[in-house]
Amino acid sequence: MSLATITVPERLLLGSGPSPVPQRILDALALPTIGHLDPAFGALMDDVAAGLRATFRTTNAVAIPVSGTGSAGMEAMVANLVRPGDRVICGVHGLFGERMADELARHGATVVRVEAEWGRAIPLTALLAAAEEPFAAMFVVHAETSTGVAQPLDGLADACRAHDALLLVDCVTSLGGHPLDLDAAGVDAAFSGTQKCLNAPPGLAPFTVGERAIARIEDGRVPSWYFDLSLVLGYWLKKPDAARAYHHTAPINLIYALAEALAIVHEEGLEARWARHAVAHEALRDALGVLGLERLAPEGEQLHSLLAVRLPDGVEDAAVRVPLLTEDGIEISGGLGPLAGKIWRIGVMGEGARVEPQERLVRALGSRLGGDTAGAVAALHAGWAA
Ligand SMILES: *Cc1c(COP(=O)(O)O)cnc(C)c1O
């Protein structure tokens, strides 16, 4: 085997992530690596923190990319903010809520699961009922990528504050795609990932923590050295009279990529970007409806950045999805858990939320399913024109 060169097939990434990485971001990745304590890099870190604050819609001082994928953000959140014996309410309505329940239990929390069927939002009344007894934190997945459902957050922050509890959110697939204003929603800490609506490669977890949550970190010992914010912030948050202190070597080039991704979000404007994702979602939904693919999420519960559709009777998942990838070069994702073989999950994320890639997908699926491709393409364009 030769390790001299690698070749990578051309792919249109319209699955659950990674999403398409635009050339501008690939170019940023290829810039020369500099040192993690170089003042020039420090200036870039400050820009990234500011860009994350704007994208999260928060004034939190702490808004950093945790080194690691989205799940590292989850790990950082729990290691810093949850102590053994804490009663933590955990919303579970898909794979990522399940993952968090597992993570919380590993950290010794008493997990109170509040569930909904996969494909539905969790009723706010159920979360609020669980919040009547004292508790330390409530966690919900804002954007359930396993089902394409957006979870409303209304009223949760007040219920948390009534018990001096923290509101914790996974916004991996909503950040930069589906409307979310962390400060308005009263969220105390949230994590995301770079490879969904931000269109950067996987490897960083945008993470923000507010004052109420920070106060908890100073109270206790964090069981993880790598994710201990009191150490990490010595590097990320430069004090005017002190140098940044080495903790671990920042993934320099990935941070270039994130900086470029945040610049792209800023250029478009966050609200314009949210609106584009909503249009892209509805247009694709209309087009796939013509091909007999109905959306899983009911109206009003849909996540703009991920469209999950039910497979029509008689269509076998892999028989379509595998050649779509290997012959047409288009990646979409299958269902997980109870929805395996029953749905396809189509990313509507950043550069994937545009008419050209969507038309390519609709044409390819139309011809593989033997449906009314022309009608579907017309519906797609009508959706974008509306
Ligand atoms: C993708 C995703 C994660 C995990 O991110 P990784 O980068 O795969 O570690 C967590 N939560 C949600 C909702 C996701 O979509």
Image (cartoon, rainbow, N blue to C red):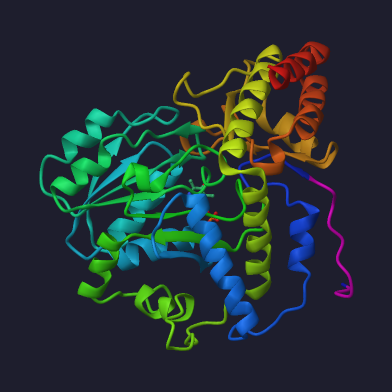
Give the farthest residue toward the left: 133
Q: Quadrant of residue 275?
A: top right
Q: Main secondary structure of the magenta part?
A: loop
Q: Is residue 258 above or below residue 355?
A: below
Residue at 67%, 26% (x, y): give it. 316
Q: Is residue 69 visible?
A: no
Q: Nearer the viewer, residue 276 or 298?
A: 276
State the image coordinates of residue 177 (x, y, percent, origin top left).
57, 40
Q: Is residue 8 magenta?
A: yes
> Closest to the observer: 314 or 31?
31
Number of callouts in the render?
A: 0
Report the span colored magenta: 2-11
Residue drawn at x 63%, y 49% is 265
Residue 126 lies left or right of residue 329; in this view the side is: left
* Residue 210 horizontal side relative to residue 12, left or right: left
Percent position of residue 166, x then y: 25, 53
